[in-house]
Amino acid sequence: MASMAWAAQAQQPAIDAGAPSDADRATYASCMARTRAGAAGIAPAAFDRFMAGVVPDMSVLPLLDSQPEFSTPIWDYLAPLVDAQRVADGQAMRAQHAEVLARVAQDSGVDAATVVAVWGVESDYGRVQGKRPLLVSLSTLACFGRRQEFFRGELLATLALLQSGDLTPDGLTGSWAGAFGQTQFMPSTYQRIAVDGDGDGRRDLVHSVPDALASTANYLKRAGWQTGQPWGFEVRVPAGWDASRAGRKAKRPVREWVAAGITRADGGAIAADDTPAALLLPAGVAGPAFLVFRNFDAIYSYNAAESYALAIALLSDRLRGGGPLIASWPTDDPPLDRARRKELQLLLLARGHDLGTPDGLVGAQTRRAIASEQQALGLAPVDGRAGRKILQALRAAGPPVLLPASTPGAP
């Protein structure tokens, strides 16, 4: 959450941090010359037109090693992605686009709830598609840091999409890594898998919701989605369970899991058949457990992180009318849903922190304000995390007592 004034102030350090040195500019120019020469299928004139004025942004390089799905505790990662607000918004979007989703399900075999869940996790239903200029980020990553060859391919795929007319260069933005559009496709994935869902002759995943939903379903279909089958479900493991038996790739027939004492968390029956399944323990044996099937792997292929796939899977269940997890995460400071995060921001505003309008989105300003209050209230660690402890502490503390201004000449 940020006020417009703060946003304007915050942009300058980012620009400074990303400004290339003279040596960086020389390296970039040489790299782009080689890329242009080897750009099969891209007309030199088109390359020059689309890349005119593009300069590297060095601030993307540290992000190569800072992906939240790998560095954030899973309960904090899932909390904003599968909260009541995102569920309600997803149900509204599912109703609004019911006709398109029915057609997509018929064509692909992928159910509406799963497609909408991908949309919700990837961009909050199109609201957050990324603000970094796509050609800037991809060309920088193509010339600096690790995985240059991969990002060079993504840059060329973007240029090919621009050349074909599927994309237009104006306002073409995305994530720091080059994912973009309503459901955040990488450019090469866009080339291979995007489809025209609205029949206008273009594959526009940025502005066309039908194109984005149809393309997402096509991706999952090609990733091995099994129509009518579940992604998995929450289970319970027996006391003393050996956690080394868990893992997405450690598949066994369901009957073996049942024989070992695995039961559904909701008390339902498990068909003890030969279907391959894996046991996930994302927070160890003390946290929620899941038995997952082939469709979980299809979701996982969209972004290779188990926490990410679990977010989509759990959101899809909620969109079908399911409830929250039965087991609790093993933390004494649970994360907050969006409504509680808004309350936290209101309490921080009451204590004098300039946050702008509360929106339930925890950004840099909110984290700094939380850290300041953690320190003032003697809470540890001072990490700026929006959890239940700081919310309860601020509720108990109330607004700060304002001391009267000193009177000139008073002793």
Image (cartoon, helix red, strand yellow):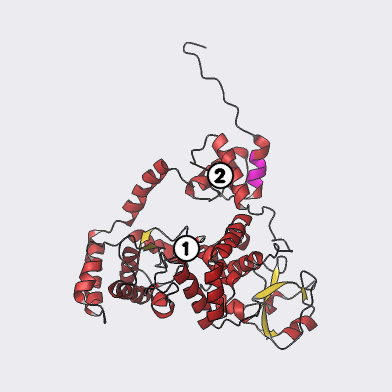
Of residues 287 and 363, the one nearer the viewer is 363
Chain part drawn in magenta: 389-394
Identify the secondary structure beneath mark 2.
helix
**Residue 12 locus on image (x, y percent):** 34, 48
Q: Which residue is mark 2?
A: 370
Quarter of the image where one finds residue 187: bottom left
Residue carrying label 1: 66
Q: Residues within 10 Å of mark 1 (few under 14, many from 20)?
A: few
Separation of disc 2 and disc 1 at Cα? 21 Å
Tell me the residue at 52%/46% (across/down): 366
Counting residues from the start of the chain, the first of labels 2 and 1 encountered is 1
Q: Is residue 168 left or right of residue 217?
A: left
Residue 239 lies in quadrant: bottom right
- Residue 390 within the magenta-colored segment of the rendering: yes
Residue 124 placement (x, y as % from top left): 52, 60
Query: Does residue 139 appear to the left or right of 355 in the view shown?
Result: left
Residue at coordinates 26% horizontally, 58% vertically from top-left? 21
**Residue 92: % across, % down:** 58, 60
> Which of the labelled discs sits on residue 98, or is there none?
none
Instruction: Please report contact status of discs 2 and 1: CB closer than 8 Å, yes or no.
Output: no
Q: Amino acid at mark 1?
A: Ser
